[in-house]
Amino acid sequence: MERIIIHSDLNNFYATVERISDPSLSGKPVAVCGNREERKGIVLAKSEEAKRYGVRTGDTVWQAQKKCPGLVVVPPHFGKYMEYSRKVRAVYARYTDLIESFGIDECWLDVTHSTRIFPPFDKMYTEKEGEKHFSEEYLRFLGDVIREEVKRELKVTVSCGVSFNKVFAKLGSDLKKPDGTTVIPFTGFKEVVGPLPVEDLLYVGKATAAKLRSMGLGTIGRLAEADDGAVCAAFGKMGENLLRYARGLDEEPVKHMDDKREYKSIGNSSTYADDVESLKQIERHIYVLSESVASRLRETGQGLADTVHLWVRYSDLTGFTVQKKVRHTALCGEIARHAFELFKENVKPPFKVRALGVTVSGFDNGESQMTFDESFGNYRKLERVERAVDEIRKKHGYDKLQRGIVAEDPAEMKNDIKNSHVIKPAAFEDRGDDKDE
């Protein structure tokens, strides 16, 4: 049966919540920015007015203010954002229990079998070549109902994409912002998505797009018509996914709102207000990132990881990603040590680093067979220590207990990346673009 999938994307989410809290910000160019003293002095989100001046996510505060001299800079309040995110999901839950999050501000909803939503609709179906499909008018109506209800109740706007699969629904929500509904119907989807640039396709990052363009596959339509063998030879298993997505063959279900999420990787990254030029600073930043990654890994219940990845971006915005296999671990110290070794092996001074990321993958879901030393030696002791640290930080604050290397820098003592970063599933590689809103 043809599905009805809605992808909802809250517009300018952080900035909108800040305006709800402080109405004096209404109509002004606003940027939600991290604190420069805590090495997070970058734009996290911005209002439509700020966007018109060219302010982008990831700009430093001074870059954003240079573009927009009247920019109002406000600090982030992540607790408020989480509260509003939960309220929005409560609205969605009136219509379906198939709600899958894609970060704090985005969700997929499967409303195919919803019986509560929608009154009778005269043009619910259309026929093409003897087959009956949901009409474009009906699909737009569904998206508009949810979009308008969120706006009316919570004063935040949503862009909705409505289609027959998750990939095209996500693509649709990106096409009409802010506060719009875009339909990509089963009948005629090729005409809508075919001319779009290939990087508009979900999970296609810059490197993948560049490679596809070098093959003459610069649009989604060209990719859909490409030779399977050539694409799979260039991209392997990933090539099969790319072709399936471009051809509208994505059949991945929307998960139930209570389903436990399956992770392929867990990571965090950070962009720094000032270039990092010393190995000691790099090591400290890697430990801060690894603290976040290890804590999140323990919370997800995915077990231990056997691969550590390091992502580096230089001040000229070039960069690289490397990885290594390690013994199964969920320890911050081990993750950080491996990541720092990867850095030293691949970067030689002098260097100017703008951003770093640490990720782990290859989860065992608790099924690894540990050696005698690992089971009864230091590993188990260190794991208990790190879990105890998690609990102390929950009760008393992140900065109340720190490693020595982190405590050497007072700013990093408070740099709780885990609870101040919004995480979304990774692309095939880092996109490095401005698609957060």
Image (tube, rainbow, N blue to C red):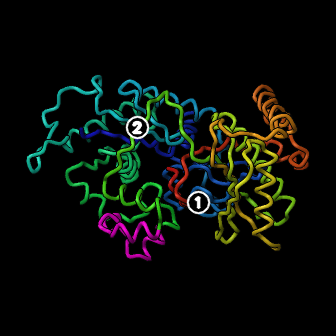
How far is the residue under mark 2 from the one under mark 1? 40 Å
Q: Residue 281, percent across and down?
A: 84, 58
Instruction: Point out the frontmost of discs 2 and 1.
Output: 2
Check disc 2 and report its element: helix, strand or loop: loop
Q: Is residue 282 left or right of residue 51?
A: right
Q: In the rendered structure, does residue 228 fall within the stretch colored magenta? A: yes
Indicate which disc residue 68 carries.
1
Given contact means CB atoms under 8 Å apart, are the residues at marks 2 and 1 in contact? Answer: no
Residue 276 part of the magenta-drawn span: no
Q: Check disc 2 and give the amino acid type.
A: Val
Q: Mark 2 points at which residue?
A: 254
Picture residue at 31% right of the left edge, 48% below the top: 182
Quadrant holding the N terminus: top left
| Residue 251, quarter of picture | top left
Pinpoint residue 375: horizontal percent, then vertical percent. Answer: 80, 35
Up-down relation of residue 327 to residue 388 (above or below): below
Q: What stretch is highlighted in magenta?
A: 209-234
Between 222 and 139, the residue placed more toward the observer is 222
Left or right, residue 351 beside residue 165: right
> Which is nearer the N-term, disc 2 or disc 1?
1
Q: Residue at image x 78%, y 48%?
A: 288
Residue located 37% across and 27% down the image: 96
Give the residue displayed 47% in from the left and 31% down from the top. Answer: 88
Q: Classify mark 2: residues with Cα within 10 Å, few (<14), some (14-19) or many (20+).
A: many
22 and 383: which is toward the camera: 383
